[in-house]
């Protein structure tokens, strides 16, 4: 399987509403991509 997904998460402190953070990321399936490119012997 070859795929990718966008991941987002956010947090906010209970005690201080102005204390917050957001994280963004990109995940992808490395093993599936390598298999598609012909690398099959390492796993």
Image: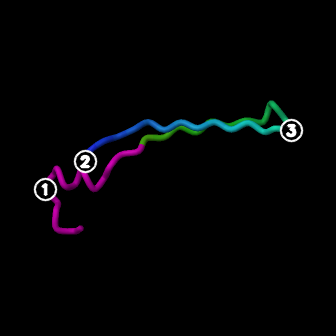
Q: Magenta segment range?
A: 27-43
Sequence-earlier tag: 2 or 3 = 2
Is 39 placed left or right of 26 in the picture?
left
On the image, the x and y values in percent for residue 26 come to 43, 41
Density class for disc 1 (Cα within 10 Å; few <14, some 14-19, many ≥20) is: few
Callout 3: SS: loop
Mark nearest the camera among 1 and 2 is 2
Q: Are marks 1 and 2 in contact (CB under 8 Å)?
A: no
Q: CA distance from mark 1 to mark 2?
A: 13 Å
Q: Residue at x 81, y 31 (%)?
A: 17
The residue most toward the front is 1
Residue with the mark numbered 3: 15
State which tag comes first along the sequence, 1 or 2. Answer: 2
Q: Which mark is residue 38?
A: 1
Measuring from the top left, give residue 16's x and y in whole percent: 85, 35
Quadrant of the image for the C terminus? Answer: bottom left
Circle 1 sits in a helix, a strand or a loop, which is it? loop
Task: Name which residue lies at 16% across and 68% down.
Answer: 41
Give SS at disc 2: loop
Q: CA distance from mark 2 to mark 3?
A: 43 Å
**Mark toward the start of the polypeptide (1 vs 3):** 3
Residue on which disc 2 sits: 1
Vertical order, 1 against 8 (above or below): below
- Single out the mark in the foreground, 1 or 3: 3
């Amino acid at each position: 399987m070859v795929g990718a997904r966008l991941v987002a998460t956010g947090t906010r402190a209970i005690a201080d509403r102005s204390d917050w953070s957001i994280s963004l990321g990109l995940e992808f399936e490395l093993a599936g991509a390598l298999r598609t490119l012909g690398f099959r012997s390492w796993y």
